[in-house]
Amino acid sequence: MAINYIYPVYEVVRNASRCVNCKICEKQCANGVHKFDAKNGIMIADESKCVNCHRCVATCPTRALKIVKSDNTYRENANWSAESMKEIYKQAESGGVLLSSMGNPQPLPVYWDKIVINAAQVTNPSVDPLREPMETTVFLGSKPDEIVRDKDGKIVDNMTSQLKLSTPIMFSAMSYGSISYNAHASLAKAAEKLGIFYNTGEGGLHEDFYRYGKNTIVQVASGRFGVYKDYLEAGACIEIKVGQGAKPGIGGHLPGTKIVGDISKTRMIPVGSDAISPAPHHDIYSIEDLRQLVYSLKEATGYKKPIAVKVGAVHNVSAVASGIARSGADIIVIDGFRGGTGATPTRIRDNVGIPIELALASVDKRLRDEGIRGNVSLVVGGSIRNSADVIKAIALGADACYIATAALMAMGCHLCRSCHLGKCNWGIATQVPELVQRLDPEEGCDRLVNLVNAWTHEIKEMMGGMGINSIEALKGNRLMLRGVGLNEKELEILGIKHAGE
Amino acid sequence: MLKIDCKDKHFSEIGKTIRESKDKEIVIDNCLGHRYIASGVGGKDIVINGTPGNALGSYLDGCKIVVNGSAQDAVGDTMNDGIIIIHGNSGDATGYAMRGGKIFIKGDAGYRAGIHMKAYKDKFPVLVIGGKAGSFLGEYQAGGIILVLGVNTDSKTNVGYFTGNGMHGGKIILRSDELPDLPPQIISRKANAEDLQEIEKYVQEYCSYFGGEPKDIMEKSFYVLTADSANPYKQLYTSL
């Protein structure tokens, strides 16, 4: 029916004077946009299939291609955007729940961009990281309350297991299944090279990657896919996933069509069967129950690994975090509403959860007020886009940051937000062998290492600028931040002053 | 053989003793709500006298555990292999996400027994409940078999509400004269000869642990419940 016709959002613009009919675009596009019209001897395009991933643009040897947003418009108004109209047509046609990928794209405030960083001038000297030592090493885990001495006065080692990070950045959970083997290989290699950690997500751990165990965080989520003794033993840390920023409060359905080959093997479920993660862990209905899962994991692994608990940033996140800090967990991970995902109901992605900046500030304050901040380390994610976001997060009280969308981009992602279609032309969010092989794990690793090294250097520069030579001295140092254009309530929650104060 | 007396001991001490013990056979006495016993343990033969606490045999990787008493919640949570035999009742979420091994309960099980059980290749979880089961039996079940025998109960269906909600694989077998209310995606049928052969195997094993005559149990009728699709939510979404 014509009413369901949705005009393509993008136009493929081909400069005929540059196109040499090499057909590279045709080969590169898994969506089938480009085709050679033999009759007329020209390349043609079906832009209705285009997701604007820029693979063809990037691989066109003569720069003959560009993708532009179509100027075809509905009679839009401020209330009914073209997007809202399109969604109505889609749902009226299918009766389905709208499905999207990656983080919340709505124009809600990005608080990072309204926070500015301090620098030393005259009254205290700044530090030059090119000449002077700068400490970016971070230890994640519960810190003992007191120093205990034996009867001879010697200090008793009562330190619990810790994760040592060379820099306060880790790769956030992305399952093998949501992303490709080569993407996982890139992340694992890079984590090892950088002395940081990557996270398996809820998809189990491929047997080839057990050797990166000391740089791996293994995840236990409600579906318990691929969770067994060797898996728990394999990682340096176990993360219990309660929620994620892109879809707090709901579970996940990896469709049976994606449970193929090694994915089935790694998740330990039969080929073709849906991988359904229930919304809650059905053994966790309370903080006491969470404590039970934390301790069953500690018992199963002999107290050798810190246990992290990941929650989505929601309204009562500080109360939840207070509970987690008392549950025996060593690390709290909070994922903000801009966090990415391989697939999530659009309505949830766009409307559920709160900004990570506010959640972080509120959790850190709550834990300090209650005298339990030392029980746990605090890791935040949910669209940490650059080193300045990391600095701001740490000054607001985080111990480290998780990055995932940025890491994907380092590997080639162009943020077309079509992961749920499974045809990622960059070989990341796909299981199609021909597409997966486009991502070279060595190159992926190098680019991830470059990104994190560059950020680390920038972090050192900014720390040095503030006259700080150790990341520990920046942690929770909110005096290093000022708000710009924020109202009093926002400043109060963030615990920072306005610029000029 | 190692003997552990739980009296005045914290669970972490018991756990450490079990983990570090070279003995294959372990007897745990005076158990009174001690949690996480044998969490992630493999290759041991454990007898527990008393009432173990939550998460008994979680991530179990190939032990035999006999409980002379009842067990609490989350017995065999994410269990991979082994056998747990409970001479009593068992609490909520028994066999949560178990992938392999067997759990035999002489009496009743609480809510959500066998939730998210799944099978994989040679891994095939078996949960046998001698008495009756609570609501949400086999919720999200993806594989394996749950058998509710309803021995010594006066319940008509031997289960609570919402049996097999979200089930998308495996089998639930109920020994009863009538069926409970079932969600639309569940297909039910009377057990056929082949089913009965499979059932008898587990009934014999049940009787070998807890006594009773297999033929007495086999006399009553059995219903077999399966899911109509391994992909229950295929039609749920539309891509933007």
Image (cartoon, helix red, strand yellow):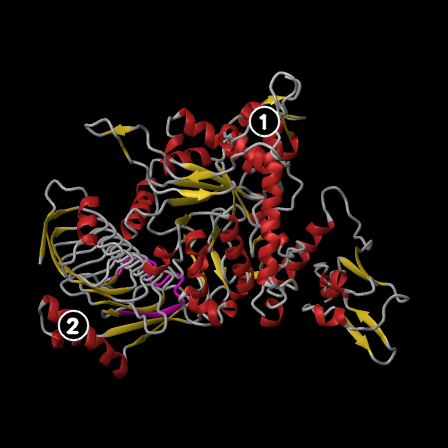
Instruction: Tell me which amino acid carries mark 1.
Output: Glu
Q: Point out the stretch of residues depicted in magenta.
A: B159-173
In this rendering, position of residue B163 left or right of residue A56: left
Query: Gap in Å between the C-alphas at discs 2 and 1?
Result: 64 Å
Q: Which mark is residue A51?
A: none
Q: Does B203 lie within the magenta span?
A: no
Q: Subunit of mark 2? A: B
Q: Quadrant of the N terminus of chain B?
A: bottom left
Classify B46 as above or below A457: below
Q: Within the image, what quadrant is residue A134 found in?
A: top right
* Secondary structure type for disc 1: helix
Kindly check if marks 2 and 1 are in contact, taking CB atoms under 8 A apart as contact: no
For label 1, count other residues whose C-alpha is less than 10 Å away and answer few (under 14), some (14-19) or many (20+): some
Residue designated by label 2: B205
Q: Within the image, what quadrant is residue B190 found in?
A: bottom left
Q: Nearer the viewer, residue A323 or A386?
A: A386
Assign the magenta stretch its main secondary structure: loop
In this rendering, position of residue A228 left or right of residue A263: left
Q: Quadrant of the C terminus of chain B?
A: bottom right
Residue A97 percent across, percent down from the top left = 57, 57
From this viewpoint, which residue is outermost toward the bottom?
B193
From this viewpoint, which residue is outermost toward the front?
A131
Residue A141 percent across, percent down from the top left = 39, 39
Residue designated by label 1: A490
For label 2, count other residues whose C-alpha is less than 10 Å away and answer few (under 14), some (14-19) or many (20+): some
Q: Subunit of mark 1? A: A
